Image (spheres, coloured by chain):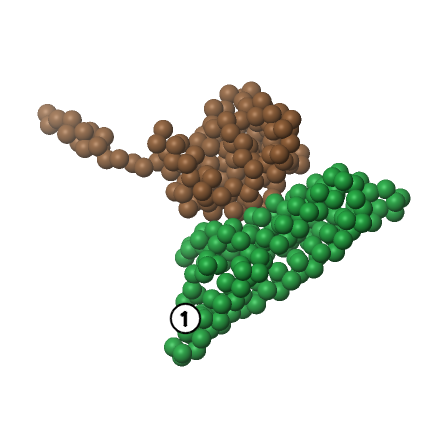
Chain colours: A green, B brown
Amino acid sequence: MDALVAQLQMQYRNYTVSLYQQGFLDERFTELRQLQDDKHPNFAAEMLSLSFDDSVKHIGNITRACKDQTGTVDFGLVDVSVHQLKCTSSSVGAKRVKDLCVTFKEYCEANNYEGCVRCLQQVDIEYNTLKTKLQDMFNLEKQIIQAGGKVPQVDGH
Amino acid sequence: MASTGGDIEQTKSVEVKKKLNVLIVDDSALIRKLHEAIIEKLGGISQTAENGEEAVNIHRNGDASFDLILMDKQMPKMDGVSATKKLREMKVTSMIVGVTTLAADEEEYKAFMDAGLDHCFEKPLSKDKLEPLINKLMDA
């Protein structure tokens, strides 16, 4: 059992560090984990769940604003939703999504429709990729706990 | 008659560490939850409001007493600028800190500050950003 726990913990450590190294997560995510305690054992997961709900809403708003039937895009409206998405992503340490939003805003400010559409596609991909990777990370945590071990603290270094 | 002066002196010397009381005003459940957790970690207690109107209503009966109000800017029903102005008109003396995603826009920032803020930070707040402020309030 100990060997299994140790193996799972190493797998978890390596996987989480890789998420930081590949730029999926930043120090904000570490801060979220540090806010977790016995009173709020699932704080990070709950925050991510709220973040995903918000992100879906913002991406939906951006998509609608970019697919305006009249052919005119309200770049101001797109910009507001992108900014909200940036804030949501930043709050939970979703670095790649946050960084994409910075580029997205530049395209909005330049009224660059093609750039905005490209960014929207990329944001959707990055958001879904992050969701999958975090799900895998939380599954590993569950396996460690079920095997009788403790989830190691990993800060990305 | 036995003097109770000694008991009173003993009571005076017992230091009761007051918990900082914070009102978190934001329409985002994510931000409310994050800021609640940070405040708790820093030793405070918090109450939340989903918009400026709720924040103002909490103060209407005159019983509310917050050391700190974290006020979002963009909210439905009543935004942070209007809510801050209203609270100051109601003679609310709590420290009000604006928390906005639009900190980069100078004119909007100035308008928010002019409404009666003590400080304005860009959201999301972090423990590192809030801690010096909280410590200052706790020491006061």
Residue closest to the eye, B11 or B67: B67
Quarter of the figure with the C terminus of chain B: top left
- Residue A121, x across and y down, in percent: 74, 56
- Residue A90, x across and y down, in percent: 58, 48
Which residue is under mark 1? A149
Q: How many marks?
A: 1
Residue visible at 18% across and 33% down?
Answer: B10
Residue visible at 63% across and 50% down?
Answer: A99
Chain letter for mark 1, please: A
Residue visible at 47% across and 47% down?
Answer: B37
Q: Is A23 situated above or below B18?
A: below
Residue closest to the eye, B26 or A111: A111
- Residue B126, x across and y down, in percent: 49, 43
Place residue B8 in its image quadrant.
Answer: top left
Quarter of the figure with the N terminus of chain B: top left
Q: Is B8 situated above or below B38?
A: above
Residue closest to the eye, B27 or A81: A81
Residue A154 visible at all = yes
Residue closest to the eye, A37 or A99: A99
- Residue B9, x across and y down, in percent: 18, 29
Q: Is A125 situated above or below B116?
A: below
Residue B86 visible at all = no
Residue visible at 62% across and 60% down?
Answer: A130
- Secondary element at image label 1: loop
> Hey, what amino acid is under mark 1?
Gly
